[in-house]
Image (cartoon, helix red, strand yellow):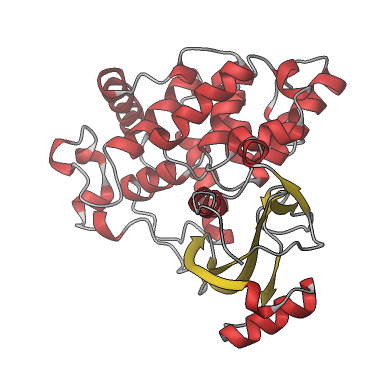
Amino acid sequence: MMPGPEMQNIRRALKDWYAVHKRDLPWRNTRDPYVIWLSEIILQQTRVDQGMPYFMNFLKHFPDVHALARAPHDRIKKLWEGLGYYRRAENLHKTAKIVVNQHDGKFPGTYKELLKLPGIGPYTAAAIASFAYDEPVAVTDGNVYRVLSRIFHIDTAINSSAGKKLFARVAGEFLDRSNPALHNQSIMEFGALQCVPKNPGCENCPVKNYCAAYANDAVERLPVKIPRKASRKRFFYYLISMTPRGVAVRKRQNNDIWHGLYEFPGFESAGPLSEREVMDKFRKKFHIRSGTLRHVQTVKHQLTHQDLQLNFWLTGSVVQDGRYFDYDSLQKMAFPVVLRRILDDMINIPNFDT
């Protein structure tokens, strides 16, 4: 770490930069832990421009934790539709209920107590504790990792066990304990807007004279990250049964992707199947004639660490799997965004002829 005076100069430079360049975001204009928590959960793995409409919509429908806790779970999932990482929505509802039922509607006021709530890890707990309660704890998200790795020229991988411990220690030592909220906001925003992953604005950087990576021409090489393993490949075969009764759907109940969301009847295979193999499988599984089946689309969809191939078949036959709903009802139900797009496309096929 740098000597004390230099550390103070860097902190001051970051705060001065933040005062000029910070974005006007609604969750920065409050000390309400509910609003801060809601924004942090929505923005996990999500860009601000993508998450902002969801944040505003959730706050409109659920202005406080009591409203969120008593909301029907399917309503929360529907409002979350398209945002991805649906486990966040599950934990959002669980935490709201715990805060209301066990804490009288008040969020715990310390980092350690916040960590006990579902979906709140070290970063989110530090953000809430420092922004809402001024607890002197340092946030460590991807932006902070990047800024610290460059200023102090740390080449330990940020996604290694050793790296996480090292960066947590460095962030804690670098923290301005007299004003943790402003410090954390400054360094996070600096990483988001100035010290970006590619082509950062080093020439106009207010801390370049203190930046070890800049001095050693190592900015583009930092932070170091261990390459992730190859994505898992999965193959899904869905049967869209469209009849005068409506469209057949079912809710995913297994502990897997899209838990609690609706999907079409179907199956997953270990590898790609031929059309004949798919028709035979559908015929045996759903007891329908092969002649009523039509392959309509194959879509590739990427999730974190998973590459999905989704194959969609259409039939006018009734299947005994799931329940039938009309289109108005389906519009109110939560689907994975890729299935929602297919449903919207299929519903426009007039008078499907079996």
Q: Which residue lies at the image location 77% right of the left edge and 36% below the top edge?
A: 116
> From what the image shows, is residue 146 above or below residue 255?
above
Q: Please tell me which residue lies in front, 16 or 332.
A: 332
Residue 81, image x, y percentages: 58, 40
Q: Position of residue 228 (x, y in %)?
A: 49, 68
In the rendered image, is residue 273 in sight?
A: no
Image position of 126 (left or right of 181): right
Q: Residue at x 51, y 30 (%)?
A: 54
| Residue 65 versus residue 3 in the image, above or below | above
From the viewer's side, name the closer residue of 130 and 53.
53
For the C terminus, the image quarter is bottom right
Q: Is residue 1 left or right of residue 263?
A: left
Q: Residue at x 55, y 35 (%)?
A: 42
What residue appears at the point 75 percent right and 61 percent down from the top-left corner?
A: 318
* Number of numbered markers: 0
Residue at the extreme right of the image, as rendered: 102
Q: Nearer the viewer, residue 158 or 169?
A: 158
In the image, 218: left or right of 41?
Answer: left
